[in-house]
Image (cartoon, grey):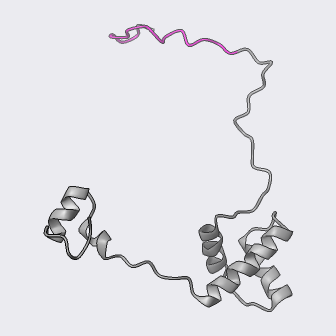
C-alpha cells in the first residue's frame, strides 16, 4: 500500500495503516565491517567462555586478538547479538516449601472506620 504509484497521498495511506509518517522514510543502516569482525570475535570468545561479561571480553579481545575496544561498544554489540554472560543469579525470593503460609484474614472485610481492625 505504501507505493509511489498509489493514488492516495502518503499522509492518508499512513493514517489508514495506522503508522507514523516518518516510518515510511526509514532506511535501515547496514552493519559496518569493523563491527562485523568485532561481533565475530565476541561470538567466538562467548562461545568458548560463556561466563565472561563485557568487561572480561574486552580484556580477552585485547590479549588474544590485539583488539583495543571500549567496554561500552562491546556491551552494545552483545545486546545487538542477544548474548549475555551466564552466571548464577541471586535467588532471594525462593520460599521454603516447609514453611506454613498464613491466610490474609482481612481480604474480604470492608474497613470503613478508624480502629476497626
Residue at 62% of width from left, 80% of height from top? 73
Query: Is residue 96 one of those drawn in magenta?
Result: no
Instruction: Where is residue 57? Give x, y as percent.
Output: 77, 76
Q: Is 109 on the left-hand or right-hand side of 57? A: left
Query: Is residue 112 one of those drawn in magenta?
Result: yes
Q: Using the rendered view, name the quadrant where residue 77 is placed.
A: bottom right
Residue at 78% of width from left, 21% of height from top? 97
Res. 56 visible in picture? no
Instruction: Where is residue 112? Give x, y as percent.
Output: 33, 11
Residue at 22% of width from left, 63% of height from top? 14
Q: How many marks?
A: 0
Q: Using the rendered view, name the quadrant where residue 21 is placed.
A: bottom left
Q: Looking at the picture, tell me which residue is in the foreground, 116 or 7.
A: 7
Q: Main secondary structure of the magenta part?
A: loop
Q: Using the rendered view, name the quadrant where residue 55 is placed.
A: bottom right
Q: Is 9 on the left-hand or right-hand side of 81? A: left
In the displayed structure, would residue 105 be above or below residue 22?
above
Instruction: Where is residue 89? Give x, y as percent.
Output: 75, 49
In the displayed structure, would residue 53 be above or below residue 18?
below
In the displayed structure, would residue 16 be above or below residue 102?
below
Magenta-colored span: 101-115
Q: Looking at the picture, tell me which residue is in the foreground, 117 or 6.
A: 6
Q: Looking at the picture, tell me which residue is in the foreground, 101 or 86.
A: 86
Q: Is 30 on the left-hand or right-hand side of 54? A: left
Q: Quadrant of the N terminus?
A: bottom left
Amino acid at each position: 500500500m505504501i507505493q509511489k504509484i498509489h493514488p492516495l497521498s502518503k499522509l492518508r495511506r499512513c493514517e489508514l495503516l495506522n503508522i507514523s509518517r516518518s516510518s515510511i522514510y526509514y532506511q535501515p543502516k547496514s552493519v559496518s565491517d569493523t563491527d562485523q569482525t568485532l561481533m565475530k570475535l565476541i561470538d567466538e570468545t562467548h562461545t568458548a567462555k560463556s561466563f565472561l561479561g563485557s568487561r572480561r571480553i574486552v580484556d580477552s579481545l585485547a590479549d588474544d586478538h590485539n583488539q583495543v575496544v571500549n567496554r561500552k561498544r562491546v556491551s552494545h554489540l552483545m545486546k545487538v547479538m542477544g548474548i549475555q554472560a551466564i552466571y548464577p543469579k541471586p535467588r532471594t525470593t525462593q520460599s521454603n516449601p516447609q514453611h506454613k503460609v498464613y491466610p490474609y484474614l482481612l481480604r474480604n472485610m470492608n474497613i470503613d472506620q478508624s480502629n476497626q481492625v
